[in-house]
Amino acid sequence: MQTIGIALLGVGTVGSAVARTLQEKGDELARQTGMQLVVRWGMARHPERVIAAGLPEQAATTSLDPILEDPNVVVIVEALGGEEPAATYMKRALQAGKHVVTANKEALSKHFAELVAVAREQQRALLFEASVGAGIPLMASLRQLLSVNRIERIRGIVNGTTNFILTLMAEEGVPYHDALREAQRLGYAEPDPTADVEGLDAAYKLSILASLAAGQHLHPDRIDRRGITSVTPDQILDARTRGGAVKLIAEALRKDEEWELRVHPIFVPGSDLLAHVRLNLNAIELTCDRVGTVVLYGPGAGPAPTAAALLADVIDAVRFGPALLPEVEATS
Ligand code: HSE
């Protein structure tokens, strides 16, 4: 049995869900994988968070340094969220010879090419299954598809919070602010939910998916973006009476060698599968030149599915190291 030391950067909703999952399932995972995962550090501004997550007091740190200096830490799980200091910390972790696993769509989408280049240089893993579609095995499927296919189009619902709000408004007439509060209570929303409702979170996720399909970093700033705040309750209810739904759709379309990228709320007719994706579920259609269209559907937000995806990545990081690194070239 191998013992694998891990460190959690960030012990908020996601980080503490990782700690909890390991407390509940660590032994079962060890039997399945031959790896006993041990949380050696929890980095948080407030040490109480670390203790509240069921970790020992001596695991608490406010600084990255002891983690990087600990030779027993093999994998760093980045669950800080936000661009900085997360991006810099991930880079430093890779440079210190640690594998990095992240759920952070903002930092990854803004620094994708650079982080992949550092990981390659250092021959370390950089895995990010949890960053898009939480529990949906999206990156694993994309890797498989991309080894033979060219992806022509990506289209889907990639933000659980806005989909949850739109569903409650349409089906139960719940006012916008009440629906948002409920999404926050359930742990779906970003710490600042503006990122959800203004479509930023969806843009980060689309940027990651499209960059993988393009083999080139497509920065989220390039995305034409509109959130759900401009949608009225009447429009949402009217869509329902017409048999469809208003959905926040993220779309990337290959046009020769250019990509058109947009995130916007639109009317989706009932004949379209995406109209029936409810609550915090996500669905992503990948249109491939050989396989045709594949749809991946499942829980796209929430602490439990996100933690499960992060832990699966920890196991893959140890098993495969840099072998799963994607091709993401920097754009000139
Ligand atoms: N706030 C995000 C969402 C969390 O609602 O989709 C999962 O990335």
Image: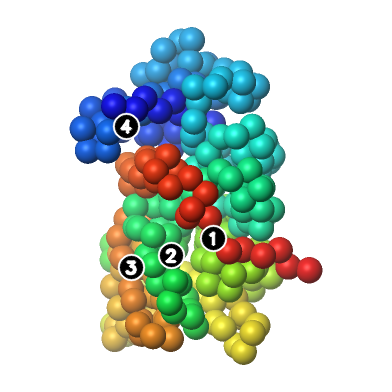
Find residue 121 and report its horizontal and vertical position in percent: 66, 48
Packing grade of label 2 (10 A; few <14, some 14-19, many >=20) is some
Work out whether residue 287 can be spotted: yes
- Residue identified by numbered label 3: 296
- Circles 4 and 2 in contact, beta carbons < 8 Å: no
Q: Amino acid at mark 4?
A: Met
Tell me the CA gap for discs 4 and 1: 25 Å
Packing grade of label 4 (10 A; few <14, some 14-19, many >=20) is many
Colour setting: rainbow
Q: Quadrant of residue 136?
A: bottom left
- Circles 4 and 1 in contact, beta carbons < 8 Å: no
Q: Residue at x 78, y 68 (%)?
A: 332
Q: What is the number of the mark on residue 326? A: 1
- Residue identified by numbered label 4: 35
Q: Amino acid at mark 1?
A: Pro
The tag earlier along the polypeptide, 4 or 3, is: 4
The tag earlier along the polypeptide, 4 or 1, is: 4
Tag 1 secondary structure: loop
Q: Amino acid at mark 3?
A: Leu
In the foreground, 8 or 83: 8
Residue 226 vs 181, above or below: the answer is below
- Circles 2 and 1 in contact, beta carbons < 8 Å: yes
Disc 3 or disc 2, which is closer to the eye? 2
Q: What is the number of the mark on residue 143? A: 2
Q: Residue at x 51, y 34 (%)?
A: 76
In the foreground, 92 or 8: 92
